[in-house]
Image (tube, grey):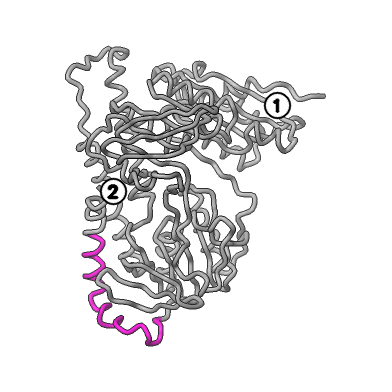
Amino acid sequence: MGTVLTSVLLSKPNQNFMSTKANQSKKSQNTTSQPEEYDLLVLGSGAAGKLLSWTLAPKGMKTAVIERKYVGGACPNIACLPSKNVIHSAKVASFFFRSREFGISKENCHINMEAVRQRKRDMVQGLVDAHLANYKASGAELMMGSGRFVGPKTIEVTLADGAKRLLRGKHVVINTGTHATIDSTPGLAEANPMSHIEALELDHLPEHLLVIGGGYVGLELAQAMRRFGSRATLIERNPRLIHREDPDVSEAMQQLFKDEGLDVLTNTRIVRAEGQSGQLVKLHVNRDGADGVLEGTHILVATGRTPNTKDIGLELAGVELTDHGYVKVNERLETTASGVWAAGDCAGSPHFTHISENDFHIIRDNILGGRRVTTGRQVPFCMFTDPEFARIGLSETEAKERGIAYRLAKVSMAVVFRAKTLSETRGFMKALIDAGSDRILGFAAFGVGAGDTMATVQVAMLAGLPYTALRDAIFTHPTLPEGLIQLFVNVPSAAN
């Protein structure tokens, strides 16, 4: 599957690269010559890297971006956007299976995974084309090849045809991202499990999908495949799903999966794997001290991310790593090497595209002489299960750990009129209000449109507005943000 995806995504980029840089092989055969000088070099074309190049190249900075495989990084090619595309197809499938509820016949319903995949591929190709157009318009140079530091602020690039170029930048940005972690469980790597990349390229339905990991990727894709018609078993080593969130969130998510016929095993440790994913696999597990065996046809591993910082010569550039392998940065996103910055996942920033985009703003302004920092910034997030789970600010768990007193307001999504019209009343919203003032400390929602509704609360928090501003607002009826009025009406009175 991976070979097919690569050809789809890289055929046009390589053609564009060769047509616009036809002479680069000629001038790059001898890397012992003096390096080509640039104002800005970016290793990796993820969110921060591409935005830096598109923004600073038009300002007159000679800019080059080195990308090994995916134009635009993981998000538009193999992660955020493709996964949400497939998840929406699964949502549509769920409507068919619920069709009687809406007065619609579902006879002859059939899931065509090749068509699901093609819809995703078409979107991805459109995104790649848009990225290439942005590079052309900005004047930034895109090099398709593997980059490795060979000295301070100096990168050797091995191009697709084997030719090499030696580049040196006044400013260098490391934006290499992360990849799915495959742990050392005996037999797991040999079973050739899928990561999200291969799962999003499936042209058939797994008969029984074993999903290892109860975080974002595991929950989203397990539900999607179940809705397409696969049997799915979710295996989580912690006592509950998304265990860092509040218990009521975990309980609601687990009940959702139970209702949809998805098997969930918590407190379960995988001891050994055998077989081949895509054929027949067995996972030998220990759950609450009891041994057992799970059989399936496919394995999806979603147990975390590993930074792409190995074997790219960072030690030769004077760039240090953290104990977990991320690039060590300060609050300005500067590395331990002068003139070298790091952004996005590889820098240990929260693993969200919108945070990488904010890293871009910080590095851009600092390169231009500013003093922006990462400290104190908000980190909103949304898990795109159906319904969604979204949160901004403090959770109850975090507030208790920090000894922060709060007032809690919580309402069921069943009180939101728009949710009623959609027959999507599962879930709840809750808000944490400072015990001694009307300041909003945090907001969480498990429900339809949770991510969009959260944005309204986030803007109020950014503006420093009291919760009463939302309680007394006039929101259009019937819309989902209208439910915030009911939520904030339920804030308990402040203690005297």
Mark 1 = which residue?
407
Q: Which residues are magenta?
A: 12-36
Q: Residue at x 50, y 48 (%)?
A: 351
Q: Position of residue 68 (x, y in %)?
A: 34, 63
Q: Residue at x 24, y 64 (%)?
A: 14
Q: Is residue 475 visible?
A: yes
Q: Quadrant of residue 100?
A: top left
Q: Position of residue 306 (x, y in %)?
A: 47, 53
Determine if the magenta segment contains residue 345: no
Q: Does residue 104 lie above or below 69 as drawn?
A: above
Q: Position of residue 312 (x, y in %)?
A: 44, 67
* Helix, strand or loop for disc 1: strand
Mark 2 = which residue?
124
Of 123 and 229, which appears nearest the observer?
229
Q: Position of residue 433 (x, y in %)?
A: 68, 30
What's under tag 1, amino acid-wise? Arg
